[in-house]
């Protein structure tokens, strides 16, 4: 992968919580850079729902998990258990 990209594991995606940023979602889903992610979101071509909150755009994590074929009903691992 290119500079600045990380390998996203199921655990890392789940650790994001309930929402994430457009650039992070774009990187997870398609390996896109920040500008590519925002451009796709503004064109309405982002592969999962993007929610506008005031001037910000956020992406729910559950649709990302579903797109990746990860069970969203599976209990997530808790630290220390």
Image (cartoon, rainbow, N blue to C red):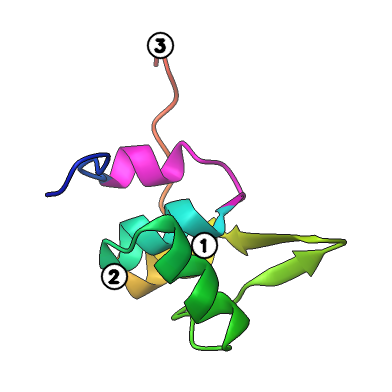
Query: How far apart, in angstroms, are the residues tagged by discs 2 and 1?
Result: 11 Å
Quadrant location of residue 33? bottom left
Mark 3, secondary structure of its residue: loop
Residue at 12% x, 49% y: name it.
1
Q: Position of residue 61 (x, y in %)?
A: 52, 57
Q: Is residue 72 above or below residue 2?
A: below
Q: Quadrant of the C terminus?
A: top left
Circles 2 and 3 in contact, beta carbons < 8 Å: no
Q: Is residue 18 magenta?
A: yes
Residue ID at (39%, 46%): 13
What span is in magenta? 10-20
User: Upstream in the sequence, badge 2 or badge 3?
Assistant: 2
Judge whether 35 appears above or below 50 on screen: above
Which residue corresponds to mark 3?
80
**Residue 62, disc:** 1
Which of the two labelled residues, at mark 3 and mark 1, occupies the earlier sequence position?
Answer: 1
- For this orientation, the residue located farthest to the bottom is 44
C-alpha distance separating marks 2 and 3: 26 Å
The residue under label 2 is 69
Between label 2 and label 3, give the one nearer the viewer. Answer: 2
């Amino acid at each position: 992968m290119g500079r600045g990209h990380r390998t996203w594991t199921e655990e890392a995606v789940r650790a994001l919580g309930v929402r994430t940023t457009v650039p992070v979602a774009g990187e997870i889903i398609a390996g896109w850079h920040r500008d590519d992610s925002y451009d796709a979101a503004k064109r309405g071509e982002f592969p999962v729902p993007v929610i506008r909150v005031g001037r910000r755009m956020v992406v729910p994590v559950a649709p990302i998990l579903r797109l990746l074929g990860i069970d969203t009903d599976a209990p997530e691992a808790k630290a220390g258990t």
